[in-house]
Amino acid sequence: TMKDNYDLVVIGGGPGGYEAAIRAGQLGMSVACIEKRVYKGEPALGGTCLNVGCIPSKALLDSSHRYEATKHDLAEHGISTGDVAIDIEQMIARKEGIVKQLTGGVAALLKGNGVDWLQGWGTLVDGKGTDKKVKFTALEDESETTITAKNVILAAGSVPIEIPVAKTDGDRIVDSTGALDFTEVPKRLGVIGAGVIGLELGSVWRRLGAEVVVYEALPSFLAAADKDISKEAGKMLKKQGLDIRVDTKVTNAEVKGDQVVVTSENKGESSEESFDKLIVCVGRRAYSEKLLGDDSGITLTERGLIDVNDQCKTNLDGVYAIGDLVRGPMLAHKAMEEGMMAVERIHGEKAQVNYDTIINVIYTHPEIAWVGLTEQEASDAGYEVKTGSFNLAANGRALAQSEAQGSIKVVADAKTDRLLGMHAISAGAGDIVHQGMIAMEFVSSIEDLQLMTFAHPTISEAVHEAALSADGRAIHAIQRKKRKK
Ligand code: FAD
Ligand code: NAD
């Protein structure tokens, strides 16, 4: 069922769009969510995140981790297993089951909240007046209908960036989507881009037995993370067998027979290597094709993002844009909170996303995660910085569960003692740094963290110790030099 007129039309049914649609339904608006995605032959909600992003990648990370841990980490516990084998078809089938359950769940949530899911393309034809015009092109028969809406949220997300030197062919040279569906473990796997996707999907196939080479054009590795953490991460991933080549540019990739021959250049020297598969993951770009008509009235930024303010409002009243289409990190949770904010703003409320506390998590093993400022960023922002850190090697729980690697670091303003950032490479780092996020939201000081009682034995105790260590007071580390009181 489709109405001619809605209070809100959301274009895009990813985490940003579907969450906005649900919230609007809760608030009693008449809402349509337009989504054109077809996944494995079926129309699907959930966007990149649920179909070919966050969730399927985490499913494969879990399977591959269990395989590797079963194979290599059980002997020290006195457990013998005999031969361990992996059935790739079953691993992929499990992933598909999870995707299907979640995307089906979103369809049920939209329905339950009275949201019309329109299966097809949405184009904002004219967003200028009070009645905005949206063209809907149905997937089923390509019929076109114009609907009007008092408000529109653009939530079309992003797609992988393509590079001319390594054009994807859907078989040997693939993007992240192709890398979630290999039918066998490549013997040798090349990866272009040592970003989040390169590390996560590179780890999946490495754990399953592939030899992995990762080409990174920049001289530094994980430039957005705190330097102490990225250094430690680089060492750990190398030890795990990810051959990360920084400062190395791929100049050509060509399919020859059943191999991809990659030519790369490091410090002026060119070399060639062959792979069974090559993943191109050099970032993503906003997906605005077919989203905006010629006369939509919407302003884009120089980089092709939709221009919005801190509340995700575009240059037009009643038109908002959220998620991967707009400035800021391309993360599902950021898209979701923006969707919620946009709808609440439309409803006349004062919602505001706190962009200073968006968490980053990279789901390697151990995980790498952070919130707030790195030491360098804090110093560049003019703070007199103090830091504290604690090594997991001295954490009882980490040792007891064979996870005694990595560290947790806090960054604070030395003058006011205020917590500015938390950085972790540890078991469960993605969950651990939520403590930093909550503490920062409540403007906590390092002293606050020092005075709280953390349960023993937990990985979280390392947060307590890192805070103590900022003043030279860590108990399970010797810090005579740093101590002031
Ligand atoms: P999307 O999820 O891209 O959804 C937009 C939807 O709009 C799409 O389904 C698209 O089909 C639809 N659409 C586009 N144009 C139109 C149109 N004109 N008409 C109708 N529909 C349209 N983020 C994390 O936070 N954590 C992770 O662990 C994580 N892992 C990832 C792993 C991979 C392999 C990838 C690729 C991404 C990952 N991300 C992760 C990023 C995350 O998926 C995105 O940030 C998130 O999906 C953005 O949400 P969105 O709603 O803005 O856009
Ligand atoms: P990315 O921006 O994280 O990393 C891309 C990397 O490729 C960078 O290090 C960049 O320097 C490098 N690069 C760019 N061009 C290159 C070239 N020509 N040759 C070699 N290296 C090159 O991008 P991504 O890994 O493709 O991921 C895309 C987005 O998806 C990310 O921005 C992230 O926000 C999101 N994502 C998030 C998660 C997560 O939160 N766990 C997981 C996967 C993806």
Image (cartoon, rainbow, N blue to C red):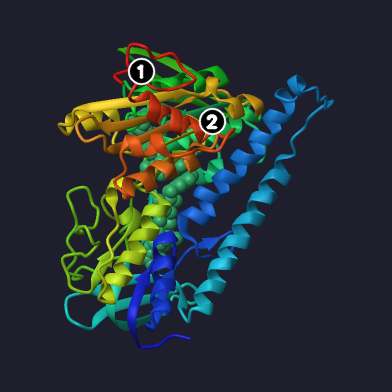
Q: In terms of secondary structure, where does tag 2 sit?
A: loop
Q: Position of residue 400 (x, y in %)?
A: 65, 26
Front residue of this view, candidates 351 and 483: 483
Quadrant in the picture for residue 405:
top right
Residue drawn at (36%, 66%) of the image: 340
Amino acid at circle 1: Glu
Front residue of this view, candidates 151 and 384: 384
Q: Position of residue 391 (x, y in %)?
A: 48, 22
Residue drawn at (39%, 22%) of the image: 473
Residue 366's disc number: 2
**Lateral position of residue 250 relative to residue 208, left or right:** left
Amino acid at circle 2: Pro
Quadrant in the picture for residue 452:
top left
Q: Which residue is mark 1?
A: 265
Q: Give whichever of discs 2 and 1 has the lower sequence position.
A: 1
Q: In whole angstroms, how far apart are the C-alphas of marks 2 and 1?
A: 31 Å
Residue drawn at (23%, 83%) of the image: 131
Other-residue count near label 1 (Cα within 10 Å), few / some / many at <14 / 14–19 / ≥20: some
Quadrant in the picture for residue 207:
top right
- Residue 282 visible to the viewer: no
- Residue 252 visible to the viewer: yes
Quadrant containing ligand 2 reads: top left
Residue drawn at (38%, 24%) of the image: 469
**Lateral position of residue 244 relative to residue 218, left or right:** right
